[in-house]
Amino acid sequence: MSAKQSAHRGFRRLQSLTGILLLLSSGVGTYLLATDASLWLLAFSHAVGLMIIVAFDLVLGLYSLASSKSAYLPSIAAAFLGFVLQLGDVFTAPQYNMTIAYFAHYLFGLWAFDLLLGLQFAVVIVGFIARPHAQYLARRRTKRGKEFDYSRRGLLRAMGGFAGLIGIGVLLGSLKLTGPAQQSNQSSATTTTVAGAGSVANVNSLQVGTPVLFEYPAGYPSALVKNQDGSLAAVSMLCTHVCCQCSYDAASKVYYCPCHGSVFDLAGRVVRGPATTDLPTIQLRVDGSGNVFPTGVSNPGPCQV
Ligand code: FES
């Protein structure tokens, strides 16, 4: 077998492997998008970024399986970018009221996320292994010029193009994130009450079992409810699983998290997981006129309340 045949054969085999890895990566990314509602409700821009990565992986996987040499550099570029961006997600935790350590613990605890990272890393490694073949073939000239582009500039160009497209997608997704997504889960069964200055409600205008929403501290959604016996309970509405905003389910009289389905009673106790920690409790002071003031948080959860 000539050196040319050997290079073609080795390159084709590695490209087929790259194609399979990319298609698997696309499938795992799709699984994550389909099963993790927190991507859509909490981190919409991440969902958009992942959708673009899934699309790249699908197209490049098919091209690689078809042994298109032009897919070689873009595949490495897309996999490398996907790997770096997925890892970088961990550092966006403060944007979602979480510590980086807590978010990393959640993300790396997802088998699909780990597999996605592994597949993208494997594509980069296979691309590196195919390098000698690629270099050989790129040096050869056919009647129409070089067999294919294999250059650092080509790699950087592909990476820049993908980064630009993902950046635009994430930017558009961010616009939605700061829009109604974070506020849309509030139930219409909640009420507002007439209260004194600085207070969140007045005891006399609260309806038993119907929460009033307020922010405490500023920017953190919380709910106050009057119990049957007249006592008050106020809790943070940020789910202690991954900090999605809970909503009030008037039919069951519980707080429900739309991201992964955790349920809490009106005192904030976990009724159903995956959350394992009760909602943070807001301490209250009631003045002589019945005005209710939040004064502190007694059991801060992972959402930095
Ligand atoms: S964020 Fe996962 S159940 Fe609430």
Image: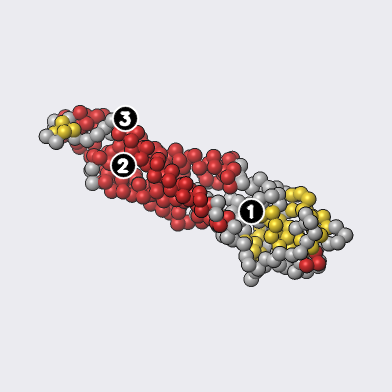
Whether residue 129 is visible, yes or no, is no
At which x and y percent is residue 103?
Answer: 57, 44
- Please tell me how crowded label 3 is: few (under 14), some (14-19), or many (20+) other residues with Cα within 10 Å: few
Instruction: Please report whichever mark, 1 or 3, sits nearer to the chain's N-terminal start.
Output: 3
What residue is rendered at 39% in x and 44% in y? 165
Tell me which amino acid carries mark 1: Leu
Image vertical order of residue 151 relative to residue 180, above or below: above
At which x and y percent is residue 33?
Answer: 45, 54
| Residue 252 position by quadrant | bottom right
Tell me which amino acid carries mark 2: Thr
Q: Mark 2 points at which residue?
A: 18
At which x and y percent is residue 180?
Answer: 56, 57
Mark 1 and mark 2 residues within 8 Å of each other at the beta carbon: no
Q: Mark 3 points at which residue?
A: 152
Instruction: Please report whichever mark, 1 or 2, sits nearer to the chain's N-terminal start.
Output: 2
Helix, strand, or loop for circle 2? helix
Asked whether 140 or 199 is in front, the reply is 199
Residue 276 lies left or right of residue 106; in this view the side is right
Helix, strand, or loop for circle 3? helix
Question: Depth-wise, is mark 1 or mark 2 nearer the camera?
Answer: 1
- Please tell me how crowded label 2 is: few (under 14), some (14-19), or many (20+) other residues with Cα within 10 Å: many
Tell me which amino acid carries mark 3: Arg
Q: Residue furthest front?
A: 197
